[in-house]
Image: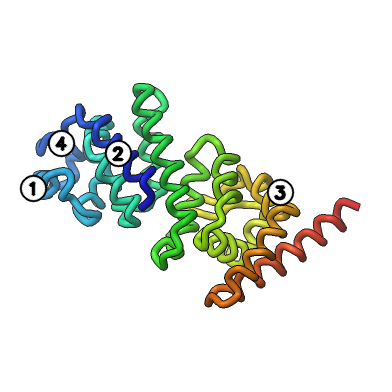
């Protein structure tokens, strides 16, 4: 985990430590096991809770169990687990709960630290070449792209990175999402979105990106994923020709 993300998680704990939740959280009268759930959730300290402990809560909070202040109490740990690729629930749902809690009306410092978490999380996964990051990349990208307010900033971080992770994720994404991006004009995820797709296509098909792919192939030609870089280059080249032809 990059230091920027680690520091941000510390700030999350400091920022939200004033919010407290109790093992008497109210919930739907349809839940016979509500007392049991509360007891289980509060049987550990906040920092000891794992993704299994928090999964039910994240899925139900503010709809049928607990309120926005309860979510604020658990938010630092939920985000910390998300940063470790141990998201208690779908990352999209985790961020969507912020919308449900009307977080854009929260204190300015609370909004700021959450925005910083999203961008630090993005920088971290872009440069992480681990197998786990590779598996989670598409879901994290689509969620962050939807909820973070500046898509250009996300693309700039990806574009400027020279790391193995950045080119590996780009190659995989272009290969796996070719039809969704270039034909259906959408960024697929928990909910498919058309926002930002044109900005992504313009960047992906740019001279700068093509030159980078070609350069990275030779840098990593002895790596197991070099073939995917080459494959991604072929896709980009084909899409560039198609775009040029359609613009004639």
Identify the residue position indicated by label 2 in the image: 63
Answer with mark 2 or mark 3, whichever residue precedes in sequence.
2
For the residues labelled 4 and 1, the Cα–Cα distance comes to: 14 Å
Which of the two labelled residues, at mark 1 and mark 3, occupies the earlier sequence position? 1
Left or right of residue 152, residue 102 in this image: left
Residue indicated by mark 4: 25
Residue 241's x, y, as percent? Answer: 82, 61
Which mark sits nearer the N-terminus, 2 or 1? 1
- At 59% from the left edge and 64% from the top edge, which residue is drawn? 171
Q: Quadrant of residue 240?
A: bottom right
Task: Mark 4 vs mark 1: give the one in front.
Answer: 1
Quote the CA–CA distance across marks 2 and 3: 39 Å
Q: Residue at x 15, y 50 (%)?
A: 48
At a point 21% along the width and 54% down the height, the residue shown is: 50
Q: Nearer the viewer, residue 171 or 78?
A: 171
The residue at which mark 3 appears reads as 202
Assign a secondary structure to mark 4. Answer: loop
- Find residue 162 and report its horizontal and vertical position in percent: 56, 56
Q: Secondary structure at mark 2?
A: loop
Above or below for 68 versus 47: above
Nearer to us: label 2 or label 1: 1
- Per the image, the residue denoted by label 1 is 43
- Which mark lies nearer to you, 2 or 3? 3
Instruction: Give how far apart the Cα atoms at labels 2 and 4 are.
Output: 13 Å
Label 2 environment density (alpha carbons within 10 Å; few <14, some 14–19, many ≥20): few
State yes or no: discs 2 and 4 in contact (Cβ < 8 Å).
no
142 sits left or right of 118 in the view: right
């Amino acid at each position: 985990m990059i230091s920027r993300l680690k520091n941000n998680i510390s700030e999350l704990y400091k920022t939200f430590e004033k919010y407290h939740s109790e093992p008497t959280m109210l919930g739907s009268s349809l839940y016979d096991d509500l007392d049991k759930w509360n007891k289980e959730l509060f049987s550990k300290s906040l920092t000891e809770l794992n993704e299994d402990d928090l999964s039910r809560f994240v899925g139900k909070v503010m709809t049928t169990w607990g309120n926005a202040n309860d979510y604020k109490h658990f938010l630092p740990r939920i985000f910390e687990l998300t940063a470790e690729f141990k998201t208690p629930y779908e990352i999209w749902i985790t961020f969507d709960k912020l919308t449900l809690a009307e977080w854009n009306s929260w204190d300015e410092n609370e909004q700021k630290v959450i925005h910083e978490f999203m961008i630090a999380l993005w920088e971290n996964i872009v440069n992480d070449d681990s197998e786990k990051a590779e598996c989670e990349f598409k879901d994290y990208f689509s969620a962050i792209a939807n909820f973070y307010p500046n898509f250009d900033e996300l693309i700039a971080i990806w574009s400027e990175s020279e790391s193995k992770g950045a080119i590996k994720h780009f190659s995989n994404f272009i290969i796996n999402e070719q039809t969704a991006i270039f034909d259906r004009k959408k960024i697929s995820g928990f909910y498919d979105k058309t926002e930002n797709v044109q900005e992504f296509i313009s960047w992906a098909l740019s001279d700068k990106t093509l030159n980078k792919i070609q350069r990275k192939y030779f840098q990593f030609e002895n790596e197991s994923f070099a073939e995917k870089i080459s494959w991604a280059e072929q896709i980009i080249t084909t899409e560039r020709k198609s775009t040029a032809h359609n613009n004639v």
